[in-house]
Image: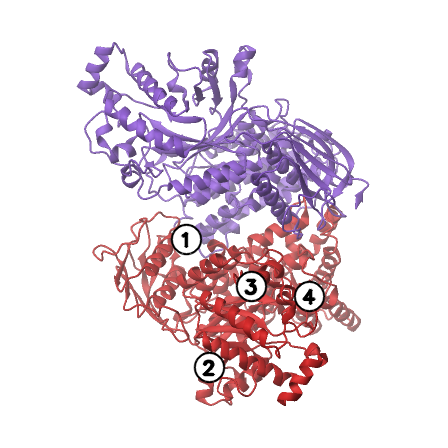
Chain colours: A red, B purple
């Protein structure tokens, strides 16, 4: 079926962010789409945005007759990839397709052409480019290597739309390749254990947004998470039984490679090693015994870098791990060594004196040089955190900057590769928009020379594990990480936040189909908290809240790795979509001339609903001990809603409020903006705008 | 922590069905709980209801200190069962527990005592009983064999509640055992292929409601779904590549055994064999070639029971399958032989004449006797559909009655075992309440003698595969099948439909946690149909609809196994909870004296919302071809809502409507009750009641 026009779906995209609002208030009449249309490259749901996109009107029908053919170079990974693509397409459109991809080019209208094999071990700078051309009768995806095919097929899936006639691909020509070659996600499986299925579904999600480095934080004070056949006490005594067998690791590695993702293992040394030392206390800088840490922070236990037996141990251990993990890079951690053990051990003090090592930073540099020699022996290059940056490091080292752009700049000025993680810490509970603005080559990099800039390889989102369990980790990572993925893949000029959120919503939906649980878990957790009651009442509140970041949680109460993460703060999404859409609504109402009346009415409906919800929630609060702490928050939201409604009345009537009212509201707003139960209402700024508008005695719209 | 009172959770349970309504309308003030309390045995969420339950006030706290110990007989299955229990408990309460079950009785407060091993192969009548006693300090589950432990632990999970203080188990003493020993679910994997993961999650769900027979319908005209190493063409040419390897079968069998579930394979013979004959046409009663069927019904292709080579083939094949499937029973199908090939084949006609076989039914009896001899050789007993009931069958045969109670009665009168499936066909899209009323020992069995009654072993829910895909099969099976599970487990006196629905809602929630997709898939499918639009508008409509049964669908349009099952009829739940709760609301409003005003107000809110939804849905209809067919239904719902609102006005005002109005409404109601897009609005009966009340000029409540 040839499509003559795709006008329908173009409008559809443009109005999405507005349509989302009907999630929030059901009784409000829908408003018409805004007149302005976004530029052509923005019209699809593809995220990250491709480098070049052109769209023609029309479509390539996607139905039960959809067949694909593989041309050119072929290998089993490509076949699996094509098969996975077909299964996902089938799931997306709900139409059965032929069970096997077809390699005979005869009939098939969707052709994949791959020129040559990829490297046997994926590395930095491997070609990920692809070209996609869709006409009304034929679609053609071509790529130099399977890596480009893997990326391109994700684009194809994101392009599938439907309209009044059928599912279809818009008629696009896309030429695409990434801006940065290192687009990573760190997952800490130490503070809280994450079973293999959590890793796999997150690899699926990474591939969906074209990320290519999985940084597996495998050892820390709280756990040693890999089976070592040479030193079995590491996983036996260092993991509470929660570790990956080497077979499972190999399984995950194959899974990642099928999706074009490198896996970098991190064994954090010489600090953050309590779990190692629980198994082998003789490696420590002070006498044991040691225990797996149950809390978090920077602890004293540390390896003793002055002992030769440590290097013998590490030589064997790294040899074992080097043969397990194929990637060229090996993450040695190196962060947060407090040096307390080193500064009190007589043998270490004597060693430093003998070798003229003036401080603990130099001692760590000595340790890193020894480590580098061992890793070199096994063909591995080093990546480590900021702190390893010391004179004498091999030029092949990559520095992962968690402390800021300045450290990243330092690294590349000194000739090292650098990747950025500062600004990409997911446990800070920032918005996608905030992360989206952080650019490894942003303003802070303006002073760098071109060769220095070229050494900035990309970035990594970091999911530290203090406040995540398998149940809620997906909701902390996704969909926000997709915004980081776009920052690292797409051109720096791609920075339309509204459009990013429009596409992010689609990604969030797609990821649920892939098996991610960021939305289903939210409902399950709200249901648990609500007990036998319908969770809709709690959801009305929860949709308006945002959890505080790790720092505030840490200060609020004493947490251990056994503390249940089943509270409202653990369920609520890091970013309130409802509050964001409400802010947009308030913005439109207070700045636009047209539609002001509709918008004010919508705002009123929402505020009334939020205000009245408190009574419903209070009525069921005594049914669940997990619900109790939500009540003060609910009351705060009620107060905020009342303030908003009052402000609306002033705006509507054109009367100016008394100054005392204004002052009183500001005090209330300040109070509301303080965490309760480690949560914040996300509508405070919007209510503030309404109060300001009321006080400015904004004129009512024409009736 | 010792709980002094459990008043809280008692009320909580009682008001559940009412609370559910806030799912439906958000803006309505909640009403208070009804005064009446249910008898004590009904207070928990356990489904099926145990034989004897007594509850004391108080609770046994369930928190991070929860530990269990295994006493008495132990085996690996019990350990796996205990471990699975702990993981599910952890998931349910969101609190980390110790990673391993503890076998040291010292500290543990939750003790499991098992007396003796179960049979190596689970069989009919194996003891499934257990006893559970929970005091404020100790809980004790005891059972004669691991089978009882498996059942009892499901009860424990269903007992977990929370209140204002903690999660807890109520202080119960439960003595439990099933009423029927055969509580099965048939899944047809032939008309539509179901991958292993679909089977596994449905085994999980079966275990959750204590079902014990998985009837695996493995061959039919549309597919032969098991790998045969002796006759590989069966799966190679008979399955489109969609079959279970023998390793996968063994995996499923072990999975089922761990959950106390027998697996009965069905190889339907001599009819329903197109897929066999596509591979081995020489077994047919007429010359081939044959093809896998793509449609459904009763087809001509049939085995030729007069050929000795057929019995040689079946001897080898059954030998292979008998060693794969351990259960004592082997299902030979035997249904719907139309006999056309038998009546036209000269050799068969000659054979019948020679042997004095007077008709095709007798010829099938001859075939079955030959089959019985082969099965006997491999130690297997026969189960088959109604049609195999002919003189000369061995007394060990079990008849599965799909045609009605009368056939079941016939079977047991003749000395055979019988199980009921008539009334348990899930593809008829009946309500849980309807299935709940069907009792294998119901009124139709009143004439039977006690020994005859004793031969009625139980029943099986049947999920035939014509209109299910992996995406929607869960929603067709669950939660309705849980009502059948209760009918087959609990005492016949257990028949409080309202209470069943209260507990069914909890089961439905629990099953989602277990990985069933009856609710997540509904949302995904509605999202697909809505395209880029928010699916909330469609959901408002879809929640009010019910799909027609297989018969009507079959007559409405031509279906094949490649027809997409992605339409609204495939997404919508077989039973509308919204409509059921609305009917309850209307019932209360029109029959009770108290609360009439509140209820009428609630009805009005709902009707306004449903009426107004049509405008919203129409506005987005042209965005999706899958949405188009919903619009006439939406209009019907709008009309029904208008009728309801008009009726309410009459009721409110106390005025009597004109007769013409009444007639007009009845016509509209009749029209509305006809399928559109293979769907029916489920609120017609309730609107009819409102119209009747209006015409009866019901007095308005006191203001």
Sequence-wise, the earlier of marks 3 and 1 is 1
Question: Pointer 2: what residue?
Answer: A396
Looking at the rendered structure, the secondary structure element under dot 3 is loop
- Could you tell me how far apart the alpha carbons at marks 1 and 4 are, in whole angstroms? 51 Å
Mark 4 neighbour density, 10 Å: few (under 14) some (14–19) many (20 or more): some
- Whether labels 1 and 2 belong to a single chain: the reply is yes
- Could you tell me how far apart the alpha carbons at marks 3 and 1 are, in whole angstroms? 46 Å
Question: Pointer 1: what residue?
Answer: A92
Residue A290 numbered mark, or none: 4
Foreground mark, 1 or 4? 4
Label 2: chain letter: A
Quadrant position of residue B548: top left
Foreground mark, 3 or 1? 3
- Whether labels 2 and 4 belong to a single chain: the reply is yes
Residue B98 location, x and y as percent? 66, 51
Sequence-wise, the earlier of marks 2 and 4 is 4
- Could you tell me how far apart the alpha carbons at marks 2 and 4 are, in whole angstroms? 35 Å
Residue A231 numbered mark, or none: 3
Foreground mark, 2 or 4? 4
Sequence-wise, the earlier of marks 1 and 4 is 1
Label 3: chain letter: A
């Amino acid at each position: 079926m040839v499509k003559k026009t795709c006008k329908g779906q173009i409008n559809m995209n443009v109005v999405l962010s507005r349509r989302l609002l009907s999630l929030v208030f059901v009784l409000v009449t829908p408003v018409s789409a805004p007149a302005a249309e976004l530029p052509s490259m923005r019209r699809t749901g593809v995220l990250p945005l491709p480098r070049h996109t052109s769209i023609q009107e029309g479509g390539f029908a996607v139905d039960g007759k959809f067949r694909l053919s593989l041309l050119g170079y072929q290998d089993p990974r490509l076949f699996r990839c094509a098969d996975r693509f077909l299964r996902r397409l089938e799931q997306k459109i709900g139409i059965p397709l032929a069970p096997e991809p077809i390699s005979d080019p005869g009939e098939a209208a969707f052709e994949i052409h791959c020129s040559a094999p990829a490297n046997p071990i994926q590395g930095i700078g491997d070609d990920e480019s692809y070209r996609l051309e869709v006409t009304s009768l034929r679609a053609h995806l071509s790529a130099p290597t399977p890596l480009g095919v893997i990326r391109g097929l994700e684009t194809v899936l994101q392009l599938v739309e439907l309209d009044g006639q059928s599912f279809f691909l818009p008629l696009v020509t896309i030429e695409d390749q990434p801006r940065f070659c290192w687009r990573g996600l760190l997952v800490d499986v130490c503070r809280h254990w994450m079973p293999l299925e959590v890793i796999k579904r997150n690899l699926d999600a990474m591939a969906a947004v074209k990320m290519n480095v999985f940084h597996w934080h495998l050892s820390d004070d709280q756990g040693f998470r890999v089976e070592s056949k040479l030193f079995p006490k590491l996983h036996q005594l260092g993991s509470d039984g929660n570790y990956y067998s080497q077979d499972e690791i190999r399984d995950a590695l194959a899974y990642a490679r099928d999706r074009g993702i490198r896996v970098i293992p991190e064994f954090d040394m010489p600090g953050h090693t309590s779990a190692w030392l629980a198994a082998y206390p003789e490696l420590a800088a002070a006498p044991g015994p040691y225990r797996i840490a149950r809390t978090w922070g920077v602890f004293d236990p540390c390896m003793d870098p002055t002992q030769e037996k440590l290097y013998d141990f590490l030589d064997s251990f790294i040899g074992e791990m080097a043969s397990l993990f194929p990637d060229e890079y090996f993450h040695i951690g190196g962060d947060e060594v407090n040096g307390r053990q080193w500064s009190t051990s007589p043998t270490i003090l004597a060693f430093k004196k003998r070798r003229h090592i003036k401080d603990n930073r130099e001692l760590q540099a000595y340790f890193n040089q020894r480590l580098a020699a061992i890793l070199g022996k096994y063909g591995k290059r080093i990546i480590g955190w900021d702190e390893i940056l010391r004179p004498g490091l091999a030029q092949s080292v990559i520095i992962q900057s968690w402390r800021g752009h300045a450290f990243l700049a330092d690294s590349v000025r000194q000739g090292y590769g650098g990747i950025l993680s500062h600004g990409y810490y997911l446990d800070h509970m920032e918005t996608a928009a905030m992360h989206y603005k952080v650019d490894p080559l942003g303003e802070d990099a303006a002073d760098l020379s071109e060769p220095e800039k070229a050494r900035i390889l990309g970035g990594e989102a970091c999911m530290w594990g203090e406040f995540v369990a398998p149940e809620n980790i997906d909701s902390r990572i996704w969909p926000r990480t997709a915004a980081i993925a776009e920052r690292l893949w797409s051109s720096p000029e791609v920075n339309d936040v509204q459009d990013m959120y429009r596409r992010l919503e689609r990604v969030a939906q797609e990821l649920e189909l892939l098996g991610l649980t960021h939305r289903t878990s939210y409902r399950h957790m709200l249901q648990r908290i609500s007990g036998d009651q319908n969770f809709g009442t709690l959801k009305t509140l929860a949709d308006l809240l945002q959890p505080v970041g790790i720092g505030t949680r840490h200060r609020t109460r004493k947490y251990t790795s056994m503390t249940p993460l089943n509270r409202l703060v653990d369920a609520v999404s890091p970013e309130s979509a409802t509050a964001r859409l409400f802010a947009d609504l308030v913005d439109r109402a207070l700045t636009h001339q047209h539609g002001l009346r509709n918008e004010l009415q919508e705002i009123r409906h929402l505020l009334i609903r939020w205000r009245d919800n408190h009574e419903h929630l209070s009525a069921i609060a005594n049914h669940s001990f997990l619900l109790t702490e939500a009540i003060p928050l609910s009351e705060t939201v009620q107060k905020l809603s009342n303030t908003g409604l009052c402000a609306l009345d002033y705006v509507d009537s054109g009367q100016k409020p008394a100054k005392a009212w204004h002052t009183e509201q500001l005090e209330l707003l300040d109070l509301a903006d303080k965490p309760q139960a480690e949560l914040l209402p996300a509508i405070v700024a919007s209510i503030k705008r309404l109060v300001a508008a009321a006080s400015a005695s904004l004129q009512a719209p024409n009736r």
